[in-house]
Image (cartoon, rainbow, N blue to C red):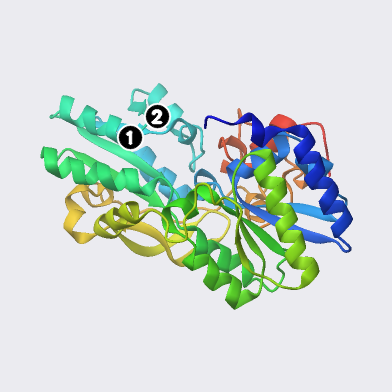
Amino acid sequence: MKYLDEYRNADDVRRYIDAIGQLITRPVNIMEVCGGQTHALVRFGIDELLPDKVTLLHGPGCPVCVTPTETIDRALAIAARAETIFCSYGDMLRVPGSHRDLFSVKASGGDVRIVYSALDALDLAEQNPAREVVFFAVGFETTAPAHAMAVVEARRRRLPNFSLLVAHVLVPPALEVILSDPDRRVDGFLAAGHVCAIMGLDEYSLLVDKYQVPMVVTGFEPLDLVQGILRCVRQLEHGSPSLDNQYARAVRPSGNLAARAVLKEVFQTVDRRWRGLGMIPKSGFALAQPFAEFDAERKFPMKLAEVDDPIECISGQVLTGHRRPNQCPSFGTICTPDKPLGATMVSSEGACAAYYRYKRNEVS
């Protein structure tokens, strides 16, 4: 972005925080959905500058964090095969499976490579026609269009040795799980601007209407976030829940029509299990039947049992806003980024990782 500093202007941020303090009359809990938003809020100390009546809860908006252990185990089994080049974004390599992670597979001789895009993996498939190249397609709706285009391109280039291990999850079904929880603590949401930039606003409008909860689509810089919080607080004070688009500079109501078209062509919606939230109907993408030849689960069939996080790990409670990372007895002791019990500590967007980096010595 050309003009980034203006979204980090401390005086402007302070003015919005003061406005929140003047407006708010009762305690409220606001959940930011995206892990990138969580890191920005903690990194810039916004959570500490806000009035005491505003409590920020951290949602399930980290795709690495909600990828279940059995999916990691599937990735590990594929990556360990001698004929396979397994490609992944870097933040997946330390996510623990049942007994090990991708780093340990790589250390044991597995050909595991960090790439910056699915197209990098596609090029590897073209350069290594005798090897199976598998890309670990993790992410929300934000990254899914690029992964879909990689499949379209693989077909165009006639690369049968390329496939995706698809672990995409969709945000609105997860928000519905949180909203329908009888013990819900959340009064309002800051929705993830990058997801809405792809998918538009329709699904979020339905949630607002159904559950009568304020929802503000918000960016990722300090000024975006405090503006989003102010708008959310204003709705709560006035008793008028609605969908508000703070991130209008990037989000159109209809989203990105070209991206949505390729998603519709390449993927189908399926039930998906989330770490910490369980099975959520129609909450994930899988490759549609016309592209089944590029599906790593079909190329490498295996049966895997569902695996829960270690009993010491409360990541599920963190992802649903019931606990904060520093309320976990294992936080910073037996659970650290070097030896994580759960994905929320190791992911670059995980709430536990944010607290460890910026609030390490604080215990709630």
Instruction: Give the amino acid at mark 2.
Output: Val
Amino acid beneath label 1:
Ala
- In the structure shown, which secondary structural element does the residue marked by tag 2 occupy? helix
In the rendered image, which residue does mark 1 sit on?
Answer: 79
Cβ atoms under marks 1 and 2 closer than 8 Å: yes
Residue at screen point 25% across, 41% down: 150
Picture coordinates of residue 271, whole percent (x, y): 40, 65
Q: How many marks?
A: 2
Label 1: which secondary element: helix
- Regarding residue 350, the answer to whether it shows in the image is yes
- Residue 105 is marked as 2
The image shows residue 119, relative to residue 310, as above or below, that is: above
For the C terminus, the quadrant is top right
Mark 2 Cα shell of 10 Å, populated few (<14), some (14-19), many (≥20): some
Residue 354 vs residue 8, the one in the foreground: 8
**Does residue 360 appear left or right of residue 170 in this picture?**
right
Residue at horizontal 81 percent and vertical 40 percent from the top: 14
Residue 341 left/right relative to 86: right
Q: Position of residue 260 (x, y in %)?
A: 34, 56
Image location (x, y in percent) of residue 137: 36, 44
Task: Report how far apart the C-alphas of labels 1 and 2 lie in the structure.
Answer: 7 Å
Q: Earlier in the sequence, mark 1 or mark 2?
A: 1
Q: Nearer the viewer, residue 175 or 313?
A: 175
Image quarter for residue 264?
bottom left
